[in-house]
Every structure is written in structure tokens, then in C-alpha cells.
Amino acid sequence: MRHHQVSGIFVAFEEKASQIIANSAGFDWGLDTLSEKQIYFLDARLSREVVKSGDFDLAGMLAMLAAKKKEIGAQWIVFDGIDVLLTRLQNPAAEVDEIYRIRDWLDDSGLTAIVTTKSEDRPHESVQYGFMQFMADCVVRLGRRQEDRVASQLVQMVKYRGSGFAAAEFPVTFGPSGIEVAAGESTAVSDRASNQRISLGFSDLDSLLGGGVYRGSSTLISGLPGTAKTTLAGKFLEAACARGERTLFVSYDEGVRQIVRNLASVGIRLKKHVDSGLLQMVSTRTDAISPEELFSRLKSLINDQRPSCVVIDPLSALARSGSSLAARLVASRLVHMVKDAGISLLVTALSEADDPVAESTTLQISTIADTWIHLSYLVLSGERNRALTIVKSRGTAHSNQVRELVLSKSGLSLTDVYAAGGEVLMGTRRWEKEADVADARSRQLVEAEIKRRALNHAMARTEAEIKVLQLDLEQQRAELKVTSSEALMLDSASQSREADLRTKRESPSGAPSKRPRRKIPR
């Protein structure tokens, strides 16, 4: 009613007005700031002497309330703890008469009325003043239930004339932001869909996700204890603050100072962002607190901080309080609420078992998360190594390979996949295999160098032999040339002599010359 600035009257049969105002201060409703013209408190507590004397009559009080209604223009009235009045009457007939007197007065006044009364501590049985339900247009029952040593408050709509309503019991919480009823989720789906990508603060991981995650999306990091879920969440916090975005971190496992100290050991510095107020870190326990109450507190933190990014570590802590069904419903409502507000959400969750195949989480939020990153251990040769896998990332062409996650003082890194014989190797096994491969490569290089030198020597020897053969061939060619030249010269000289002989045999007249005959002695 305060939100609509409508004046009203509060009639208290059980507590003083000052007590009511003081008690409401814990909810930050601001009742102490309202004037008497906005809300008029009437202390209607009656002493036993007045009741026993028979002087008690509601007519006088109702007449005074009618005058006050006209004075402040009241449009609503609350009769709080009317069962206290009825109990003191100790006369069933008188109780019914006074209740009907109030009903008739409300009909005539036109005021919207709320009447509160205690019921028996048996929610499924009739209340002591059951006849009051017949005169009321709407009946709401508040109750409390304890499950696994965790108490939760419930609200149920018993009746509502002229209107349809959900008759089931719903968890209800009371907090600084008001009264929160965990009614059924709306069937409407938000149309928010940003194309802007934001970094997870880890460049190696961003590259596997095509440049990061979409703004306003939800990211789940699951894994066993010690697999560096909080460390990856810390990188996301650091990156968000570096962008100048208001960020909220809620831890259900460790204290704030311990988290800041531990993350600094791997190069994640959050203290300066906490000191500047850009990063708000809250740590709380989940023991003996219902999931609905945790949700209400978280909602109040988000409303107060108005962050652009929210990190919850681990969200699976909700399963430690109350029933698992209530925890799953709250986790689902939380993810949808934050996404509908356009806030980038990152949550961590414990895996159910140390099984590389079973990657599901207790709260079963993996189905509604936009991006799911799973961390696991790979135990080989007596060594435990961290492995990272991207199970899914909606709207992103992401890597499907298992990478080794390495933590050091300088920060985080992802080692490229190293497979041998169809097996992914990590840690010492990988270093040993890499050393063996390096040694084999060195031996191959040495052997190749020896073969290269032998080949060069053989080539040099062959080239020398070829040169000797070439020289011999050239010598033979030269000798052949000389021989050919001499033969030509001899042939030319022979032809010249033969020509001279022909010339000498022929006479000048052309007759052959006579040579004297030589006598041969007998």
C-alpha cells in the first residue's frame, strides 16, 4: 500500500504500534518515515479486567475508526491478531457476534481489509476460527515446514472468490526487498540476445570459444573440488572489473579475504577492485537456510548493486539446504532472473562423481546454461592433472578437444592437445613422451648428417674420377686431332707430288717424251 501512496489504518490487537514499527525496521520498509495521515496505528490491546467486566464492545472502536477513515481518507484497514481479542472473550457466541459486527462494518465502510489470525500448527486441519473463512473473500494461509533440519516458510491460497488461483503451497521469504513468493515461473521468455562478446579473462579459453561468451548469457563451470573452478571465476571477475563493469561475487564456501589471497597466488589481483567499490564480494553459509531465503538475499544484493556481471561460487551449495527439488527450482529461477535482466552470469557447480562420462550437476542447471565448461582430473602414472573441456556453447563454434589446464604464479594456461596412440597425454607422461620424441628426432638428425657427409664424400670422389676421365678423353681427342692433321698434310703432299709427276710426263706439244731404252746385256 505504501508503494501506491494510499492511506490506511492498522489496528493492533497483540502488539504495541511502536513494536510493530521497530520490528519492521529490519525489512527497510520505512514505516517509521510515514506520517499519521499516511498510516494510522491503533493500539487495540484490551486488558483482562475490561473483558471480564463485560464493558467490552467493538461498537465504540468501530465508530472511532469510521471517523479516522474520513479524516485521513483511508482506503484500507488491517485487523492484526484478532484471535487475541476472540480468545479473551471466552464466549463462542460473543466471538461470532463480534466477527460479524466487523464484517458488517467493513461492508458499509467500503474499505479493503486484511484480518490476521493464528491457526493451529497443523496446516491440513481446520483452524480454530474456521467460521471466519466463510465471511472472507480471500483466505491466505502461512505456514512453516522443516525438512533436513532446514525450516522454510510457505504460503497457500485457500480461497479467492471470483478469481482463479493456484491452490498449491509456495515458499515465501521476508527480506529487505519485501515479501518474495516463489510462484510458478512465467511462461514468457525474454527476447534479449546480445551479439557482443565479453572475455572470460583467459585468452586461451576465449580463443576456444570464438572470442569469449555473449554478454547477458549464463556460463556454468562444473568439476570436482580442486579443479580450479574458483580460479576461472576469479579471472572472469578480474576481466569484468578491468572493463569498468560493476560486478557481484557471492561465495558459499570460503571467506572473502581467503579468496582474494588465494587468487593472488595465480596472478589474479582483486583487492584494488574491492577497495574501489567496483567489485562487491559477499561470503555466506548455506547451513540451516532454505534455498528460498538464499534466493531472496541474492535478489536483494543484485537489486542494491545493479551489477553487469554476477558470479556465484558454487551454486550447487543450494542443494545443501532443504530439499533437492526446492534447490533445483531456486537455481532455475535464479538463472532465468539474471538472464532476463541482461546480466552476464557465471556460476560454478560441483560434479556428482569423479567420472569423465558423468558430467551432470546436482542442480541440473547444465540444460539451461548457455555455455558449459567442465573441469576434471586425469590421473596417469601416479600424477593428477587438470583437464578442461567445453561441453557446449550456444551460438558458438567451439573446440571439442580436451586441454590441460596449468596453474602457475604467472597465471593460467591451456596446453595444446598432445595425443599419442589415440591417448591424450598430460603432465609427466607428456613430458617423457616429448623427451623421447625429441631424442628420437635428434638421433634421426645425427644419422641423417652422417649419411649426408658420406654422400658428399662419394659425390666428391665420383666428381674427381669424372674429371680424370674427362682429362683423358680430352687428351685422346687432342692426339686424334694431331693425327688427323698429319694425315691431311701427308695426303696433301702426296697429291702434290702426283701432280708434279703428271706435269713432267707430258711434253710441251702434248706428245709423250721418248726415253732412251736401256740395253739389257745378254
Image (cartoon, rainbow, N blue to C red):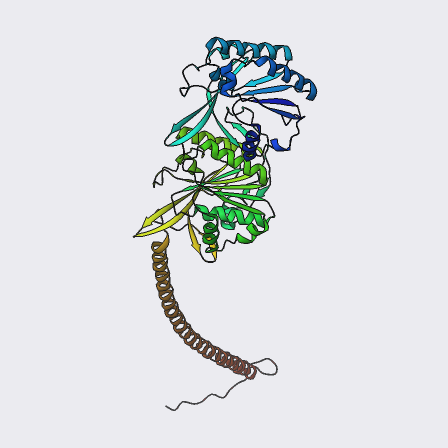
State the image coordinates of residue 502 (x, y, percent, origin top left).
54, 80
Quadrant (top left, top right, bottom left, bottom right) of the N terminus: top right
Q: Can you tell which quarter of the image residue 443 is in?
A: bottom left
Q: Nearer the viewer, residue 387 or 316?
A: 316
Visible in this render: residue 164?
no
State the image coordinates of residue 275 (x, y, percent, origin top left).
57, 52
Q: Nearer the viewer, residue 10 or 273?
A: 10
Work out which residue is located at the far left of the displayed protein and give it. 382
Is residue 207 found left or right of 520 in the rendered image? right
Quadrant (top left, top right, bottom left, bottom right) of the C terminus: bottom left
Q: Nearer the viewer, residue 331 or 351?
A: 331
State the image coordinates of residue 206 (x, y, percent, origin top left).
52, 46
The residue positioned 46% from the left and 29% from the top of the image is: 329
Visible in this render: residue 62?
yes
State the image coordinates of residue 483 (x, y, percent, origin top left).
46, 79
Q: How many labels sit on residues?
A: 0
Q: Is residue 176 above or below residue 94?
A: below
The residue positioned 37% from the left and 60% from the top of the image is: 438
Q: Is residue 391 above or below residue 430?
A: above
